[in-house]
Amino acid sequence: MARVPTILHADLDAFYASVEQLRCPELRGRPVAVGGGVVLAASYEAKRYGVSGGMAGWRARQLCPDLVFVGGHFCEYQRLADEVMAVFADFTPHVQRISIDEAFLDVAGSVHLFGSAERIGRDIRARVRTEIGLPVSVGVARTKSLAKIASQAAKPDGLLVVPPDGEREFLLPLPVDVLWGVGPATRAKFAARGIHTVAQLAESPWAEQALAPLVDARPVRKGGRAGSVGAQSAFARAFPTDDLLASVLGHLADRVACRLRAKNRAGRTVTVRIRFAGARAITHARTLPDPVAATLTLTEIALQLAREGLARHRENPQISLLAISVSKLVDQPAVQLDLLGPDTYSARWTLDHSIDAVRSRFGRRAVGYARPALAAATSVPDEFRQLAEHEL
DNA sequence: TCTGGGGTCCTAGGACCC
DNA sequence: TCTGGGGTCCTAGGACCC
């Protein structure tokens, strides 16, 4: 009954900030934030002042006047995180990477080689610390949900094992929002009913629904391919002139279509998202008979969807964000040029692939449809965008 | 002076088909 | 002519996660 816990959740602590402190010894022990206008990551020294990811830079400086801002070294983040994942793979082939800096491991088949799950957790922490120089926290439990909660409780730089007969004792005192899927909205809903802790939730009508994932032994498996590809761009509130729509959507369609083609994929559903000044947002989508991966086709569809969406919401004159997402993805083998007729489709295919080829040699800014002025004005570096991209 | 960009999953209603 | 039920696909919106 009481299975031995064999699921690990390993999570690098304040990852970007820790890398900066590793690269630059004089940053160690000091409050560090990666970013500028927005805090992308904060060191634990900074977190003690209340600085956190997503916070506006001015606000962070207000909370912590000694805060040191550093620009990100995004290639380093990717490289070091990959090295950490390689350490995990030395202990088990069953590694499910769920973001750049965290993963689940199932070590059930490894304990006869390396010792108990707790032992493996300690060894992983030691190796990542000595070989790579980064702190990583590890939670060990029977299920993925419990292991993840345990690793959060172990932070910073700790290890926590939840034995099967100690699960209730561990969970009951914790606040409800440690549970996967309980964010600000659900927490507020519970709070309005006097539910603040897992113990209180367990006594409520929502107990079964909310607590089911904790005992659900979903397997650790390799991450699948992404189900959608998107890009978005936020900007100061502006009137959605045709000029603005065409240039922003053209740029976004370029990013998305380029990624699709790079993986020989295409998608049938195109969704445009518009955020109005005042934070209200709408989506407008269309499913096409044939999958799309051509930049200009995607641009045209997105433009049409945006106009339709705006026409339905004339009460909001200004917008502050546009996004394009393509879903219902299918594999699209690279088409042979000579199989295509002399129509628009083949012309676009040829043009897109010529552009892709130039970019693969000279970089993505070398050539494209979007106006250079706009492309250069993107507020977030391409490298950071790439960190958030999922495997297609 | 109010926060970026990449995703996933769930729900609910409507259209359409059998 | 009115009736029922189930399944699937699509769209819109929202919550959540890293």
Image (cartoon, coloured by chain):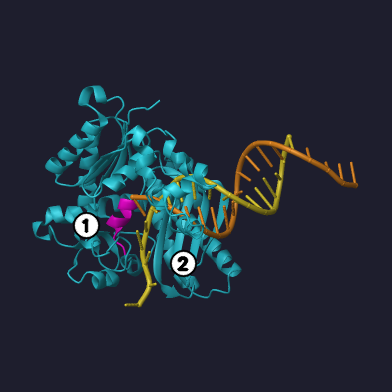
Chain colours: A cyan, B yellow, C orange
Q: Position of residue A188 (x, y in %)?
A: 47, 59
Q: Is residue A385 magenta?
A: yes
Q: Quadrant of residue A313?
A: bottom right
Q: Position of residue C18 (x, y in %)?
A: 33, 50
* Residue at image mark 2: A246
Q: Give left or right: position of A74 versus B10.
A: left
Instruction: State whether residue A358 appears in this view.
Output: no
Q: What chain does badge 2 belong to?
A: A
Q: Give left or right: position of A386 versus A70.
A: right
Q: Give left or right: position of A215 versus A358.
A: right
Q: Which type of secondary structure does the marked residue at label 1 adopt?
A: helix
Q: What chain does badge 1 belong to?
A: A
Above/below status of A343 relative to A121: below
| Residue density around tag 1, few if under 14, some if 14–19, many if 20 or more, within 10 Å | many
- Quarter holding the C terminus of chain A is top left
* Residue at image mark 1: A44
Q: Amino acid at mark 1?
A: Tyr
User: Which residues lie in the magenta part?
Assistant: A380-388
